[in-house]
């Protein structure tokens, strides 16, 4: 497919990161295959995660096609960019179409990006994940690549103001070893394994982060931060979902 939009967007992002002196630390990027289909699955802590999760595939010279909610594609600014980069819109009321599109791209040798938690984790720990990534990998016989991001929440996350112009922020991207779920194998077991792998990567990213500051909002509660606990975050998500349903 023609790549008119994606390369300039990457170039602009590189220039922006360089100007802000974002201090990247990447590990395991060799686990992203240089050819063929793959499902890249990342934790989700920021509105910018599709940029940084995509960065995990950059050393392998791969472009990631992310599955993202339909709202992003309807925005007058982000919409044309998302379509131009051939990302995949997800209509939560009719997900079969997006799933079929993802399968088609995987069979064509593309890397498809998935945030299996579906929404940003307010607690900055890994929430329960959906099994769609495993099912897609089984259906197309491609590997699943777990990814952990840490630091992106400091730029822009749910319930916090945007701080996109901060300088010298460390940002960790860890890529785990591929999983190879096969057709007929237990989807639930593989999904649990994927959750454990991503959680272990996130924990390592958090504990090795250059700035481990107790009492800050962007640090998880179990590491001394003031982020909501997983239980508090779940209650906040439930209240938000109820309010949205009432509004609809």
Image (tube, rainbow, N blue to C red):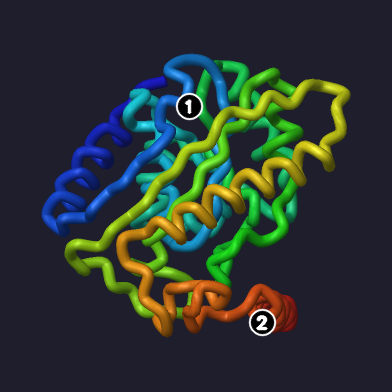
The label on residue 31 is 1
138 with respect to 206 (left or right): right
Viewer can see residue 75: no
The label on residue 215 is none
* x, y percent for residue 155: 33, 67
* x, y percent for residue 29: 40, 31
Q: Nearer the viewer, residue 174 or 10?
A: 174
Q: Nearer the viewer, residue 175 or 51?
A: 175
- Label 1 packing within 10 angstroms: few (<14), some (14-19), many (20+): some
- Label 2 packing within 10 angstroms: few (<14), some (14-19), many (20+): few
Viewer can see residue 163: yes
Q: Which residue is labeled 2 in the image?
A: 232
* x, y percent for residue 200: 59, 50
Residue drawn at (26%, 39%) of the image: 10
Task: Tell which circle, 2 or 1, labels the residue nearer the N-terminal end.
Answer: 1
Residue 42 higher or lower than 150, as above or below: above
Tell me where residue 1 sits by quadrant: top left
Residue 8 higher or lower than 202, as above or below: above
């Amino acid at each position: 497919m023609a790549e008119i939009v994606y390369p300039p967007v990457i170039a602009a992002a590189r220039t922006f990161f360089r100007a802000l002196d974002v201090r990247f630390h990447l590990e395991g990027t060799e686990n992203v295959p240089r050819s063929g289909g793959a499902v890249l699955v990342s934790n989700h802590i920021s509105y910018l995660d599709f940029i940084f999760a995509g960065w995990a595939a950059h050393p392998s010279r791969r472009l990631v096609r992310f599955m993202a909610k339909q709202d992003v594609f309807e925005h007058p600014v982000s919409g044309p960019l998302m379509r131009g980069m051939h990302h995949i819109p997800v209509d939560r009321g009719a997900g079969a179409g997006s799933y079929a599109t993802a399968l088609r791209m995987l069979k064509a040798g593309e890397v498809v990006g998935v945030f299996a938690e579906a929404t940003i984790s307010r607690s900055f720990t890994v929430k329960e994940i959906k099994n769609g990534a495993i099912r897609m990998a089984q259906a197309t016989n491609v590997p699943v690549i777990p990814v952990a991001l840490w630091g992106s929440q400091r730029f822009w996350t749910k319930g916090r103001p945007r701080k996109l112009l901060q300088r010298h922020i460390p940002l960790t991207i860890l890529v785990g070893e591929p999983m190879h779920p096969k057709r007929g194998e237990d989807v639930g077991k593989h999904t649990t394994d994927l959750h454990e792998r991503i959680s272990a990567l996130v924990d390592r990213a958090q504990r090795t982060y250059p700035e481990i500051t107790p009492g800050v909002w962007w640090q998880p509660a179990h590491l001394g931060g003031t982020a909501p606990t997983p239980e508090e975050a779940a209650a906040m998500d439930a209240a938000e979902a109820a309010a949205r349903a009432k509004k609809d």
